[in-house]
Amino acid sequence: MRDVAELARLDGRVALVAGGAGHIGCAVADALAQQGATVVVADLYGARCTEVADDIAARRGVGCRGVAVDLCDEDATRALARDVVEDDGRLDVLVHTAALVGGPHLDGWTTPFAEQRTDVWRHALELNLTSVFVLTQACAPALAASGHGSVVLFGSIYGLAGPDWRIYEGSEMGNAAGYAASKGGVLQLTRWLATTLAPEVRVNSISPGGVFRDHPDAFRTSYEERTPLRRMATEEDLVGAAVFLASDLSAYVTGVDLPVDGGWTAW
């Protein structure tokens, strides 16, 4: 029986992190690199991808490079999968963290339901859900050939439960139907892919709770009072789950969604 530390290692494996220049994606890419993986950081803005990849490579001493890609462009997304295999010779881990989260700057997104717009809804489904399907489909042959193929997708507590509107009182924040619907789709796609790509490839997902990023005090306080562990998440809270699902620590786990939510969905 291998040691737990050995099971967690990713030496010799190649990981593609879609959305890898974002807050969560950057943390996950760094965690996989710490375990020895060669990491490809893919995101919309090339300069930011390169910055993140260079920083990880310098600190962790592994191969890491950035690649610019528009995940809403199907041809570019499929080309990304081909290029990773051509450049690195293999692909063992696919992590998809990219998502339209939005905010007050995005008109028709987290506004009241009657004002939420269908063009933003469609964009959310394209990035948050359709790109997951396209990229996984494109990566599936290489993942199957790996011998350790693992797909880690990112859902959300709002793919598991409806919003508690009380936590938004006293703030200008809202909750988008398109986000919830797309993340619910990711969770069902996880199960569908798990039974379809087995036994060669494992497919699991992580559903984070709210991750603190300078939220208004009223919202943060309400959120923490609603959460059993009495705080919002940090990116650090998510990386253990990502390493677990990407590595042989979870070699007999597939089709599972792992909520990392401080107990939010336990009520």
Image (cartoon, rainbow, N blue to C red):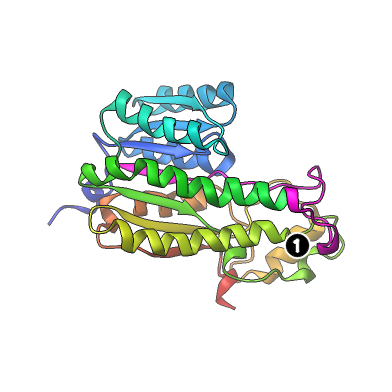
Quadrant of the rendered structure where residue 228 is? bottom right
Horizontal and vertical percent position of residue 25: 51, 41
Q: Is residue 110 magenta?
A: yes
| Residue 100 falls left or right of residue 132 | right
- Mark 1 lies on a secondary structure that is helix
At x 47%, y 57%, the residue is 206
- Residue 191, position in %: x, y? 40, 64
Residue 26 rendering spot, x and y as whole percentages: 51, 37
Residue 102, placed above or below residue 183: above
Magenta segment, prevailing SS (helix, strand or loop): loop
Residue underneath mark 1: 221
Relative vertical location of residue 68 with respect to residue 141 in this rendering, above or below: above
Residue ID at (23%, 42%): 146
Which stretch is magenta?
92-119
Image vertical order of residue 87 relative to residue 196, above or below:
above
Residue, far left:
1
Question: Which quadrant of the rendered structure holds the C terminus?
Answer: bottom right
Q: Quadrant of the N terminus?
A: bottom left
Question: Image quadrant of residue 70?
Answer: top right
Residue 7: within the magenta? no
Amino acid type, residue under disc 1 in the picture: Thr
Q: Residue at x 83, y 56 (%)?
A: 111
Q: Residue furthest front?
A: 75
- Judging depth in this view, the residue of 161 and 83 nearest the camera is 83
- Circle 1 packing at 10 Å, graded few (<14), some (14-19), many (20+), is some
